Amino acid sequence: MTRIGFAYNLKPEPPELSGPTGAAGRNQSPADGEQSRQEEDPPSVSDEFAEWDSIETIDAVADALSEIGEVIRLEANEEFPERLRAEGPDIVFNIAEGRYGVNREAHVPAICEFYGIPYSGSDPLALSICLDKARTKETLAYHGVPTAPFAVVSSMTDLPATRKLSLPLFAKPIHEGSSKGITERNFCRTWDELEAQTAFLLETYRQPVIVEEYLPGAEFTCAVLGNGREARVLPIVGMNFASLPDGALPIYGFEAKWIWDRPERPLQMFDCPAHIDDSLAKAIEIVTLDAYRVLGCRDWSRIDVRLDAAGDPNVVEVNPLPGILPNPADNSCFPKAARAAGMSYNELIQSCLRFAAARQSVALDESPGRARAA
Ligand SMILES: Nc1ncnc2c1ncn2[C@@H]1O[C@H](COP(=O)(O)OP(=O)(O)OP(=O)(O)O)[C@@H](O)[C@H]1O
Ligand SMILES: [Mg+2]
């Protein structure tokens, strides 16, 4: 039976978050900076582990994998390298977001490569590039994939570099995801607003700020599955900004993800398939697959796209470790797109593993197994 190592980072339970071994030093950013700014509270660590997975997601993935092999849970903690080496699985299914620093998403794949163990998903280089929004856009622009013009501000002395751009602008921390540090205040209509928000982001998130021209059009996110000519875009997810509170900017940021979308009053944020005509869908698919290819993504990724003033799709950012919440009520885009394509959650996870196995000539014997505890 195929032995499938399963690498993940488990989100700690809330009480642990405030403990002394909590967030210090992780991700180079204080958590929840926006709330601390708006309410003048001491920073909480409530979103410090926002990208790590819940036990519900981890169990769901393990269940899916257990239908096609023996699952060996390998939490990506300090013991991961030794455990990986000792277990020597045939292949690792990787959803680990990583612990420290700007290359954190690359660590598990790099350790797998060190031991010569096949793994699913993108390689360390692609993961690190995609966690740097400027390097991502440099790569896209070099290859002619449309993306908004931008400048990087590492300290306030770099601010003049933004003057080549046209207002309005949008500023964001360069190395974050899950809308950490992305609120309506990042939309800057004037140079004064840009200066103030850039200073705030530099101070709060302790990392460079990327300043981009604002893309005023509709927004989509695209789930890609497969490799080479087999790579395909699942039904496109459209952002329904009309579901945001009156007067809100059409931005899928911190407020929309973490404040306005409440279990008791969920936002109807996503249309899947998006309500667009075939020619726009085709144009979005082309830039999505081009971005996937030039960034070296493998097996799966989720790519955010927005229309510019001319109505042409531009790539906003690329997520080679897509969110995969199993509960349909959680509105996770990749599983939603898979469902619209007629794939169950288990089929989605298994399909990703099959693409990874085929790429690395790992035979999956497809006989049912049983999940083993960590
Ligand atoms: N140049 C831009 N023009 C207009 N809106 C933008 C621009 N860049 C980002 N946004 C808005 O901000 C949102 C969050 O930006 P982005 O996707 O880069 O952040 P993220 O935190 O990495 O997202 P995710 O949660 O997908 O990981 C986008 O979905 C979009 O609504
Ligand atoms: Mg995004």
Image (cartoon, rainbow, N blue to C red):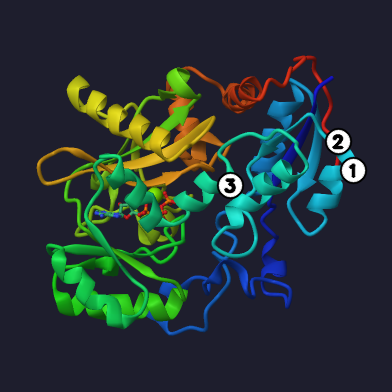
Image: 361 above or below 15 = above
Tag in front: 1 or 2: 1
Image: 52 above or below 326 = below
Q: Between disc 1 and disc 3, whose residue precedes? A: 1
The kind of residue tagged 1 is: Ala
Any part of residue 36 in sight:
no
Residue underneath mark 2: 372
Name the quarter where the N terminus is drawn: top right
**Label 1 crowd (10 A; few <14 / some 14-19 / many >=20):** few
Q: Between disc 1 and disc 2, whose residue precedes? A: 1
Q: Residue at image x 60%, y 61%?
A: 49
Tag in front: 3 or 2: 3
Residue underneath mark 3: 124
Q: Residue at image x 60%, y 21%?
A: 347
The kind of residue tagged 2 is: Arg
Q: Residue at image x 58%, y 71%?
A: 45
Secondary element under disc 1, as helix, strand or loop, is helix
Q: Which mark is residue 128?
A: none
Distance from disc 1 to disc 2, alpha carbons, whole Å, reads 15 Å
**Label 3 crowd (10 A; few <14 / some 14-19 / many >=20):** some
Q: Position of residue 336 (x, y in %)?
A: 46, 31
Image: 77 above or below 311 = below
Furthest residue in direction right, as rendered: 86
Tag in front: 1 or 3: 3
Residue underneath mark 1: 86
Secondary element under disc 2, as helix, strand or loop, is loop
Name the quarter where the C terminus is drawn: top right
